[in-house]
Amino acid sequence: MLAACASIPKPQEPVVVPGYEGIQDGAFFIEPVPEQYLFESNRRTEVAYAGDEAPGTVVVDTYARKLYLVGEGGTATRYPIAVGREGLSFRGNGVIGRKAEWPSWQPTANMIRTRPDLYAAYAGGLPGGLQNPLGARALYLYRGGRDTMFRIHGTSDAASIGHATSAGCIRLFNQDAIDLYNKVPTGTRVKVRTEAESLALEGPQMIDAYGRLVPQTPENIAKKQRDEIAIAKQEAQDRAAFEKAERKRLAACDRRGIAPEECPRPVVSGTSVTVGTRG
């Protein structure tokens, strides 16, 4: 009776990080970027900049997975990026030859030839929109007056930012792609660093226990080892809790005389466990 009078707890509102709020952009609503993807350096930040490029230059570092818009007085705006296979094919200088809002996309002939299962359906092109892999904005890199096929663009796949990806060029959160698009005009110089340039300016990088790129320091190496132990321990605890719950559920089915097809058994594959009906 008393419990019936207790207040019902309100669901916790997701944390919205400033600069990554939801945006109504023309006909499309861009969802806010979930807080868990905006870890540490994986968000737009004003930083000190040690490179020698002129203010207004866009600098892409595919090894450190960072993009810089160089500012005045040794500063820059740093954006986190995801890097696909196509993003690794260009080094050196170019210019932004074209810009587009909610760009259409068409796979290259090579993409269709190598992965027809993924790309053949889009051979005629895909209109701009939330499901388009170029996201809300695209900047097209040209060299010598010709399109290099190197793109800096948005994405709705927020989880990919800061990681290597199987396809695509240089991805940003849609909010960052819009921010960069609004700041750089057509004709802006773009510098894509070599590995040697990246090492000289950013230092060596490493993948941490969560698949994120971080500076390779003794502290981060030790932290990765600790995190891997903690992750393995948590996975073991989760697996034990799942197995205990499954035993209780199956025992309850047996006590109640529930037929096996109405009480699906767990299907074990390697270290993962899913629930499904028995064949």
Image: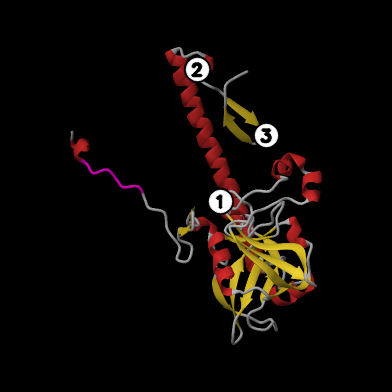
Quadrant where the C terminus sits is top right
Question: Which residue is label 3 attached to?
Answer: 270
Q: Which residues are magenta?
A: 6-11
On the image, which quarter does residue 80 sit in? bottom right
Quadrant where the N terminus sits is top left
Residue found 45% across the figure and 66% down from its top: 18
Which percent across, then down, holds residue 82?
A: 65, 59
> Which mark lies nearer to you, 2 or 3?
2
In this rendering, would 131 be left or right of 270? left
Q: Is residue 61 magenta?
A: no
- The residues bearing labels 1 and 3 have C-alpha atoms spaced at a distance of 36 Å
In this rendering, would 95 be left or right of 210? right
Badge 2 element: helix
- Residues 175 and 214: in front is 175
Question: Which residue is label 1 attached to?
Answer: 130
Q: Residue furthest bottom?
A: 73
On the image, which quarter does residue 48 sit in? bottom right
Which percent across, then down, holds residue 268?
A: 63, 29
Question: Which residue is label 2 attached to?
Answer: 262
Marks 2 and 3 in Cβ contact (< 8 Å): no
- The residues bearing labels 1 and 2 have C-alpha atoms spaced at a distance of 39 Å
